[in-house]
Amino acid sequence: MKKLIIVILIAVSAFTAATCASRKAAKELEISFNYNKQQGPGSNQYAVWIENEAGAVVKTLFVTEFTSKGRSRGGQPAQRGYTFRPTCMPSWVKAVKAETLTDAQMDAFTGATPASSGLQTFTWDFTDQEGMAVPAGTYKVYLQATYYNEGIVTYSGTFSNKDTGPLALKEEFAADVQEHKDMITNVKAELR
């Protein structure tokens, strides 16, 4: 009987050790979605960013160029898109305190709005905007898209750097605007 108990305890210990060893902390978060380019003004803008537990932006992975840099009109200097069109990614603008960022800081994460439809993928390597590793803790990923004027959709998910696997995302619409609603589809996030 003693030998059986010892064998069972050894087996349970080995199983527990193997399970713990196979559960490695995530090294990156990947967020992907299908982007369906829309026609006309007031659409095709999006941002992807990470916040810490306190709600402070840790890193912006991407923001479309119009949002951060705008465009020149009538020979005037370019006006940032979110000032020209306040419905352009309002949550990101507020969270990152966009008005305090220099053009050089904006350049670090700004990219051209994709010229054609297709899969968009962004990866966060658990570093902050300066490239320094972030501490262990709870974080939140956001994808916000202005798909048509007041039509804004935000996807978000909470996770820790000890998690792995698919991340459940919450979808919220700021207004019931149907036009161009399929600009962002099939949003997925996974901790690897």
Image (spheres, grey):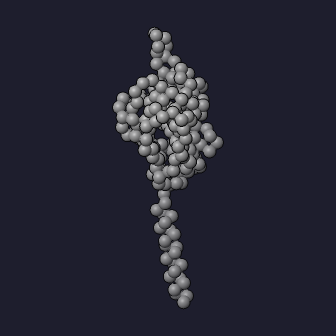
In percent of width and height, residue 144 lies at 51, 36
| Spot occupied by residue 94 in the image (x, y as percentages of width and height) | 60, 31
In this rendering, does residue 164 appear at all?
yes
* Quadrant of the image containing the N terminus: bottom right
For this orientation, the residue located farthest to the bottom is 1
Q: Is residue 106 visible?
A: no
Q: How many marks?
A: 0
Left or right of 93, for residue 192: left
Residue at 49%, 37% in the rendered image: 48
Q: Quadrant of residue 30?
A: top left
Question: Given the current orientation, which residue lies at the most extreme top position?
Answer: 75
Residue drawn where x is 43% and y is 35% of the image = 183
In the image, 109 versus 180, the foreground residue is 180
Q: Position of residue 28 (x, y in %)?
A: 47, 47
Who's the residue at 51% across and 69% down the image? Answer: 16
Q: Nearer the viewer, residue 74 or 122?
A: 74
Please name the residue shown 50% across and 50% down the image: 167
Residue 158: x, y in percent?
A: 56, 48
